């Protein structure tokens, strides 16, 4: 979603802002802009609808925007269509204050009407302009910029991360945050703000995460941070371990392909710190055995692909722990008055750690007395910080909008967690634990093996990329896997696709199967392979073309029914979906490539969804 970058220092700001915005492009946006305070203390803003290349063209057509302090923004439209006027930064009527903002100001209409009654004329339809206008209003009234900032923060409701410039203070940038990510970067040449660490990696790895209610004042020489009562506070600085290359394409045509190919290594990084001497060791859960032994229920809450991991988790954890485990969509869970308590563990799964619905579900769960354990990729993100226990996937930055390595590492970590809890609760014997952990050990290698030959996926995609509609079917873990395969395909190729429990098709959906319809049959789950085979036979009988994804063990059951057969190495049944998703990611990728889609930045989508 929207991205923020800000810089104050000794170098020209615009190149740094544009570079930072480029690194935030992956989050999804439809307009972009920058503001600087010039050496003559003029506030200059250039902003436009469209990609950053359009902003660059606009900048080239003007007198150069000089200045060593500036803010930049990529906007993903919420209030008001994507156009030049609604793009950020927004300035107040006096042209003194410029603001970039991520989040939503819920009471903006009420404030706007109030300011309009006072004669203030608004330029845009956005909620953000309300911040700029209100700040100028208070600045005029109170005569002090920080008083004005705090007055605005006291008046607005909703979520925000914001960067503020005022031409009367040409060496100072102000930042504020509530319920939207914002971090401060400390560089040799100046200081930075950004909504996402990838924007800063080129300039610094030393950062501080801002917390809700905090306000920061940045100059070229230092940073002061204040809490919501305006008391100066000291905050720890963190070193980001990711290097710049982790956030670059490294020779691949797309980040998505790079991230697919990184999955062996990513899963290795997730697993290896947590398996020692044939046992799962989760340090973050040390001393919590009595709590885990008292658990009566687990709720897994997440959105999109992370929810699909939750579906896998439901099957896997229920089998391991023999207690009820359910997966919930965070956007539903938060409003469902969930039945929770201290004997229920809520597991929130999120790559970005910033998804608003998942964050709200987390808060709801805590309010209702449950502990929250989160599985998160982005270190220091909001969900990670608000959870009682946070387990990081250590997958490295995921830039492509469509998740791949986050999905596989989340799944690996969730199953590892299941084994750990099962052991705590005496629900797993040494033999089964060994069988699973032996396969965990071989998993990265098996992933690399599957990814070493892409021909079959390229050929299948070349054959089927013109489909109007694709159906995925599978049973049990394969059903959960199909949900992810279907989402991957539709989000990047724009082909309509649906996923069904294979036994459910005949209750309605089978009427959509006609000669030539593509059905992708997931047939990796050995215990139900004969049932799955029957369902494949049913769709074949109606003329469907079938791609079957099977294992060395299940392939013989389905090979006579498949137009294409993708065979995976066998692993422990609980881990099979980690391998099973690879053909689905690759098929989706190559289909989208054949269709000429913008794979890393699919239309209308954003990497981290910070609105409801
Ligand atoms: C799909 C995808 C999304 C995310 C969902 C949750 O490829 O990436 O469905 O899984 O928006 O995002 P996080 O994991 O950041 O909470």
Image (cartoon, rainbow, N blue to C red):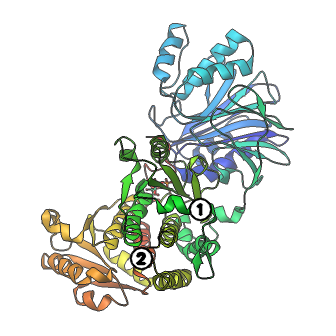
Category of crowding for the residue at label 1, using alpha-carbon neighbours closer than 10 angstroms: few (below 14), some (14–19), many (at least 20)? some
Q: Is residue 179 above or below residue 587?
A: above
Is 36 placed left or right of 349 in the picture?
right
The residue that appears at 45% across and 50% down in the rendered structure is: 605
Find residue 470 and report its image quarter.
bottom left
Q: Residue 88, labelled with which disc?
A: none
Q: Indicate the position of residue 571 as horizontal and vertical percent values.
A: 44, 84
On whether ligand 1 comes within 8 Å of the CB at mark 2, the answer is no
Q: Going 55% across and 63% down the picture, which residue do you hit?
A: 289
Q: Is residue 329 left or right of residue 448?
A: left
Q: Name the mark nearer the viewer: 1 or 2.
A: 1
| Helix, strand or loop for disc 2 | helix
Q: Position of residue 182 (x, y in %)?
A: 65, 42
Q: Is residue 118 above or below residue 398?
A: above
Query: In the shown orientation, is residue 309 left or right of residue 269?
Result: left
Q: Secondary structure at mark 1?
A: helix
Pointer 2 local density, CA inside 10 Å: few below 14, some 14–19, many at least 20: many
As measured in the structure, the alpha-carbon distance from the residue carrying label 1 to the one carrying label 2 is 22 Å
Sequence-wise, which precedes: disc 1 or disc 2? 1
* 160 over 150 or under it: above or below: below
Q: Position of residue 608 (x, y in %)?
A: 52, 50
Answer whether residue 296 is visible to the viewer in this image.
yes
Which quadrant holds the C terminus? top left
Q: Residue furthest bottom?
A: 556
Q: Nearer the viewer, residue 297 or 255?
A: 297
Residue that badge 2 annotates: 574
- Which image quadrant for residue 94? top right
Query: What residue is at 51 percent from the left and 17 percent from the top?
Result: 111
Asked which quadrant contains residue 159, the reply is: top right
Which of 98 and 420 lies nearest the eye of the viewer?
420
In this figure, which residue is indicated by the disc labeled 1?
A: 285
């Amino acid at each position: 979603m929207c991205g923020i970058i800000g810089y104050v220092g000794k170098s020209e700001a615009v190149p740094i802002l544009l570079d930072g915005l480029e690194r935030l492009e992956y989050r999804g946006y439809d307009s972009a802009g920058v503001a600087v305070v010039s050496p003559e203390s003029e506030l200059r803003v250039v902003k436009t609808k469209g990609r950053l290349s359009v902003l660059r063209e606009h900048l080239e057509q003007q007198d150069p925007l000089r200045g060593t302090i500036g803010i930049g923004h990529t906007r993903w439209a919420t209030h008001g269509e994507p156009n030049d006027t609604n793009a950020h930064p927004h300035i107040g009527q006096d042209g003194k204050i410029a603001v970039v903002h991520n989040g939503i100001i819920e009471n903006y209409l009420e404030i706007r009407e109030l300011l309009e009654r006072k004669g203030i004329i608004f330029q845009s339809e956005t909620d953000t302009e309300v911040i700029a206008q209100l700040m100028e209003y208070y600045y005029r009234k109170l005569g002090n910029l920080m008083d004005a900032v705090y007055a605005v923060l006291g008046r607005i409701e909703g979520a925000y991360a914001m960067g503020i410039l005022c031409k009367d203070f040409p060496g100072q940038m102000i930042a504020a945050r509530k319920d939207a990510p914002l971090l401060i970067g400390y560089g040799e040449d100046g200081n930075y703000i950004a909504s996402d660490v990838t924007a800063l990696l080129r300039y610094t790895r030393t950062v501080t995460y801002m917390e809700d209610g905090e306000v920061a004042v940045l100059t070229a020489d230092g940073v002061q941070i204040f809490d919501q009562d305006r008391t100066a506070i000291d905050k720890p600085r963190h070193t980001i371990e990711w290097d710049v290359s982790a956030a670059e394409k490294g020779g691949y045509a797309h980040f998505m392909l790079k991230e697919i190919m990184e999955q062996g290594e990513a899963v290795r990084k997730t697993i290896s710190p947590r398996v020692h001497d044939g046992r799962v060791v989760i340090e973050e859960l040390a001393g919590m055995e009595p709590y885990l032994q008292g658990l009566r229920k687990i709720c897994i809450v997440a959105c999109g692909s992370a929810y699909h991991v939750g579906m896998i988790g439901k099957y896997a954890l229920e089998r391991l722990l023999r207690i009820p485990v359910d997966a919930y969509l965070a956007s539903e869970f938060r409003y469902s008055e969930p039945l929770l308590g201290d004997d229920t563990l809520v597991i929130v799964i999120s790559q970005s750690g910033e998804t608003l619905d998942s964050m709200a579900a987390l808060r709801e769960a805590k309010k209702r007395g449950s502990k929250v354990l989160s599985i998160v990729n982005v270190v220091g993100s909001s969900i990670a910080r608000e959870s009682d226990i946070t387990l990081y996937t250590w997958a490295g930055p995921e830039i492509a909008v469509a998740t791949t390595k986050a999905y596989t590492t989340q799944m690996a970590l969730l199953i590892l967690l299941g084994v750990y809890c099962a052991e705590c609760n005496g629900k797993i014997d040494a033999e089964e634990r060994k069988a699973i952990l032996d396969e965990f050990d071989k998993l990265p290698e098996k992933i690399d093996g599957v990814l070493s030959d892409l021909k079959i996926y390229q050929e299948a995609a070349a054959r089927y990329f013109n489909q109007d509609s694709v159906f995925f079917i599978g049973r049990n873990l394969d059903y959960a896997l199909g949900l992810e395969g279907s989402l991957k395909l539709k989000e990047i190729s724009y082909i309509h696709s649906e996923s069904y429990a294979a036994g459910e098709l005949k209750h309605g959906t089978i009427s959509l199967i006609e000669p030539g319809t593509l059905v992708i049959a997931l047939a990796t789950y050995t215990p139900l392979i004969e049932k799955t085979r029957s369902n494949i036979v049913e769709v074949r009988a109606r003329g469907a073309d079938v791609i079957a994804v099977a294992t060395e063990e299940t392939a013989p059951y389905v090979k006579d029914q498949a137009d294409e057969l993708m065979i995976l190495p066998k692993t422990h049944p609980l881990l099979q979906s980690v391998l099973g998703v690879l053909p689905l990611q690759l098929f989706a990728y190559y289909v989208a490539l054949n269709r000429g889609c913008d794979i890393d930045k699919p239309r209308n989508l954003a990497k981290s969804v910070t609105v409801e």
